[in-house]
Amino acid sequence: MDTLLAPENIIIALGSIGAFLTIVAFGMPMLGNDNLRSRLKTVAARREELSAAQRQKFSSQPSTLRQQASRSYVTFLVEKLKLVNPADSIGIKHKLAQAGMRSEAHLYTYAFFRFVAPILFGLLTATYLFFLAKVEMGPSAKLIYSFAAAVIGFFLPQILMKNKIQNRQKAILKIFPDAMDLLVICVEAGLSMEAAFHRVASELQEQGPELAEELGLTTAELAFLPDRRQALTNLAERTGLPAIKSLVTALSQAEKYGTPISVSLRVLSQEQRDERMSRAEQKAGALPAQLTVPMIVFFLPVLFVVLIGPAIIKAMNTI
């Protein structure tokens, strides 16, 4: 235990953790699979799914081209243990859709990891503490640490999903004012709602792929769903942003009462730009307070060493 708490071992451990986090920070963007091709494939799959649903609804004969989904071991285990509760699956699907994961396989994978992660974390921690690590710790303390690791494993999938939702919402909110301006231009040019959404989605594929994907899915649903307001409601539910809900409300009211869409969109566009400017000013105002701790911890000690160090060295040499 004393060797583990030695200063040189602590420094080596902290340096190794810092190097690992640096490698992860630089490597995660390269390993990400959130590319444009997969997003376009998702939109095309959703369009094809809605088209198949409409063909099946209006067809008098049953379809002979049904394909049975492949049952993986994850799906088999989730269905065998009944890990997906039908009452809670709708809410989980909404959360997964807000994170950009819409297929049924994502639901089964999330339920599988929620079941496996606590067991895996608890067993690995217990194995390390009881058999591998030579630490002076009682059995009760080791069991407490193992139970804490199992609790962390239980909440880890939820934390990761919430983090992904927040990152996706931030990306959508960042590009949303520009999308509103483009939408106003398209509507005032005489395009319909579907054509305007399709045009804006194609223009934002590089700058805002998340919002472009949502608008593309909405375009597909507007083309195939019998109720257009349901397609707009699905857009608000998939994003979970108040700004998108305001847009959906304005479009639904314009669709219901026949009022001009361009006026409402222009007002919403100006509001979103003002809100983005206020968020930027708020971040700029909070920057000096956030820099106080880094300056005290990192800059001031170095400054003291540079200013007082030569005088201390000179005084020590004269003694």
Image (cartoon, rainbow, N blue to C red):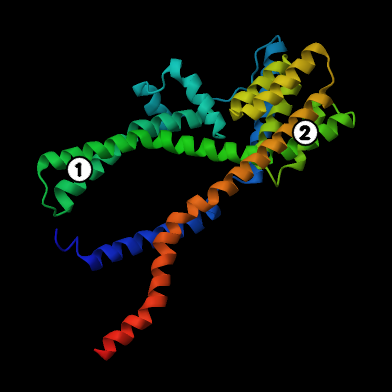
Quarter of the image for the C terminus: give it. Answer: bottom left
Q: Position of residue 276 (x, y in %)?
A: 66, 40
Q: Give the mark nearer the N terminus: 1 vs 2.
A: 1
- Quadrant in which the N terminus appears: bottom left
Residue at the spot of label 1: 126
**Can you say whether 1 is above or below 177 in the image?**
below
In percent of width and height, residue 86 lies at 45, 16
Relative to the observer, which residue lies in front, 22 or 157?
22
Neighbourhood count class around disc 1 (C-alpha, 10 Å): few under 14, some 14–19, many 20 upward: many
- In contact (CB < 8 Å): disc 1 and disc 2: no
Residue 21 is situated, as x and y percent measured from the top left of the image, at 42, 57
The percent coordinates of residue 118 (x first, y second) are 30, 35
Of 37 and 167, which appears nearest the observer? Answer: 167
Residue shown at 45% from the left, 29% from the top: 108
Q: CA separation, marks 1 and 2?
A: 54 Å
Q: Amino acid at mark 2?
A: His
